[in-house]
Image (cartoon, rainbow, N blue to C red):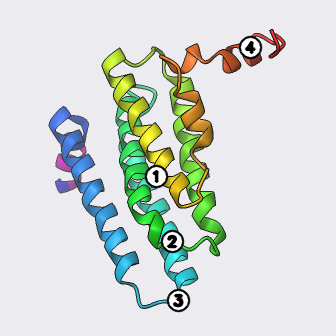
């Protein structure tokens, strides 16, 4: 019975906001655990990455992207924002550090490409600004994993990117 109530709650707008808040709190716990970890840096980074992925799977599967993909975009945004905060505490010696962010960025790009319609202009501009700031902060730490997403979001919409349009229409990129 409690599971049914939770499922109904997460399906509503207020429930979605509540789920996003829970996600933020969980990711903040992970970040705090990373910062305060007494484990060697590689082990702490590995644990953080595993927990981050597990948490994202749990939250991402709560929404049906075929019906409404926007909540999943919000999940990805919250996750990237959290990762950016945690990045200074993650050692590059752990191969999962770059891999997790690359996969998260790729999942975000795939979702954007699958949206049935362009995002409303104000929502796109907010997302666009977020990605650019996140990319710049990560570049300060030598992380370029958001480069593709940052490049794709430089235009007024994902389908307005001239390189992407040229590739999909099989035109020469030099034109």
- The first of marks 4 and 3 along the sequence is 3
Residue 110, horizontal then vertical, whole percent: 58, 33
Q: Distance between the residues labelled 4 and 1?
A: 30 Å
> Looking at the image, which residue is at 57% across and 58% down?
100
Q: How many numbered circles are shown?
A: 4
Asked whether the beta carbons under mark 4 and mark 3 sit within 8 Å of each other, the answer is no
Residue 163 shown left or right of residue 157 in the figure: right
Residue 40, horizontal then vertical, whole percent: 52, 89
- The first of marks 2 and 4 along the sequence is 2
Inspect the magenta stretch and tell me whether residue 102 lies in it: no
Asked whether the beta carbons under mark 2 and mark 3 sit within 8 Å of each other, the answer is no
Helix, strand or loop: magenta stretch? helix
- The first of marks 2 and 3 along the sequence is 3
Q: Mark 4 — residue?
A: 166
Q: Mark 1 — residue?
A: 137
Q: Distance between the residues labelled 4 and 3?
A: 47 Å
Q: Give the range drawn in magenta.
A: 3-8
Q: Distance between the residues labelled 3 and 1?
A: 25 Å
> Looking at the image, which residue is at 56% across and 74% down?
91
- The first of marks 1 and 2 along the sequence is 2
Q: Mark 3 — residue?
A: 40
Q: Tell me the element at label 4.
A: helix
Q: Which mark is residue 90?
A: 2
Q: Tell me the element at label 3.
A: loop
- The first of marks 3 and 1 along the sequence is 3
Q: Tell me the element at label 1.
A: helix
């Amino acid at each position: 019975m409690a599971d049914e109530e939770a499922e109904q709650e997460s399906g509503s707008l207020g429930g979605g906001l509540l789920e996003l808040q829970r996600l933020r709190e969980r990711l903040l716990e992970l970040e705090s655990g990373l910062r305060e970890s007494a484990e060697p840096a590689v082990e702490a980074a590995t644990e953080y990455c595993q927990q981050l992925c597990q948490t994202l799977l749990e939250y991402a599967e709560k929404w049906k992207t075929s019906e409404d993909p926007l909540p999943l975009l919000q999940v990805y945004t919250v996750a990237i924002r959290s990762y950016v905060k945690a990045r200074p505490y993650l050692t590059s010696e752990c191969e999962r550090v770059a891999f997790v962010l690359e996969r998260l960025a790729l999942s975000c790009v795939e979702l954007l490409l699958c949206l049935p319609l362009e995002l409303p202009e104000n929502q796109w501009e907010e997302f666009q600004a977020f990605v650019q700031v996140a990319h710049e902060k990560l570049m300060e730490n030598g992380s370029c994993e958001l480069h593709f997403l940052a490049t794709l979001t430089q235009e007024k919409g994902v389908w307005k990117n001239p390189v992407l349009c040229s590739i999909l229409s099989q035109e020469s990129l030099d034109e």
